[in-house]
Image (tube, helix red, strand yellow):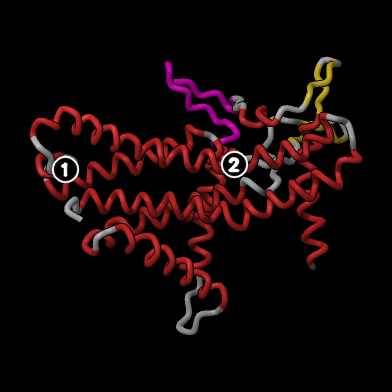
Amino acid sequence: MRRALALATTLALTLPATALGSSVEGGEEEKFDPSHEWLLHDWIPIHLGPINLSITKAVAYLILGSLLTILLCWFLMRWRLKTDPDRRQTVGEWVYEIAQTQIAEQGLPTKAIGRWFPYVASLALFIWVVNMIGFIPLPLSDEKFEVFGVELPTLGIYAATSTLSVTLTLALMTFVFTHVEGIRANGPVKYFKSWIPEVPTVMYPLIIPLEVLGQFMRLISLSVRLYANMLAGHMLILTFIGLMFVLEKVILAPLVVPAATAFYIFEVLIVVSIQAYIFAALSAIYLGSAIEPEH
């Protein structure tokens, strides 16, 4: 079983890299560049004035991630529930308990858990699923290959959360919800007043801009942390595998493939879950601090 898993992992890493190693277009060979994986081309152009709503590779992964998140939650927590839970239902209850005790209850006040638990739990599961499918070779690629004259997309690995616009949008949702809920729970005057610590009046011109900036830094912190971690992981994997194609030295395979496999396993087993947890947990904390600023 372990050998089969190792072989599958190696193939999963090698197949996308083979497609990226070089492509022939117009008789010229393009050199491998890992950054090309993050160039988003319009698959279905949709432009409303200056607004680009086109379907791209990132959008396709987000749609797939949304569908899989819904199916996963339904399968684990809604389908054929029993008084005596089986293994599937036990996993669903375990996931639910983690989302409740380790995410919602750690950041949200008791009175707000019923309102905001669905949001932070959905956020954690959605980010986890999108991160995870980013490490599964899928035929959602701009690269093509021919089979009997028919062009088909190559297998590739790509994480939508390694695109800053995606993580920034997720962070913007938490940012807006935080301040809307803070105003709803406390009123605008009390809420915005809670931003300012008790300091001498003469220091207000310095403290107020810093506190306002700190609120916007939360937005940057949420989005950049997730984006940077997922981008770095994919770049390392693609760079290690691509190295033997750039140097055209297959003899490097015994060195680069194990290194890429190690990073791959580390990302899948640790980084994917940690980043989903951190994003959801911080969202809960920000919401909780807005609802009860005194805490």
Residue 53 in sight: yes
Question: Which secondary structure lies at badge 1?
Answer: loop
Question: The disc labelled 1 sits on which kind of residue?
Answer: Pro
Q: Label 2: how many residues lie within 10 Å, few (<14), some (14-19) or many (20+)? A: many
Which quarter shows the N terminus?
Answer: bottom right
Label 2 belongs to which residue? 159
From the viewer's perspective, tell me whether residue 214 is left or right of residue 72: left
Q: Which dot marks residue 197? A: 1
Q: Earlier in the sequence, mark 2 or mark 1?
A: 2
In the picture, residue 187 is in which quadrant?
A: top left
Q: Which residues are the magenta region? A: 42-59
Question: The disc labelled 2 sits on which kind of residue?
Answer: Ala
Residue 236 percent location from the top left of the image: 68, 40
Pick the residue in front: 245 or 213: 213
- Tell me the CA gap for discs 2 and 1: 40 Å
Residue 206 percent location from the top left of the image: 19, 29
In the picture, residue 41 is in which quadrant?
A: top right
Pick the residue in front: 196 or 140: 196
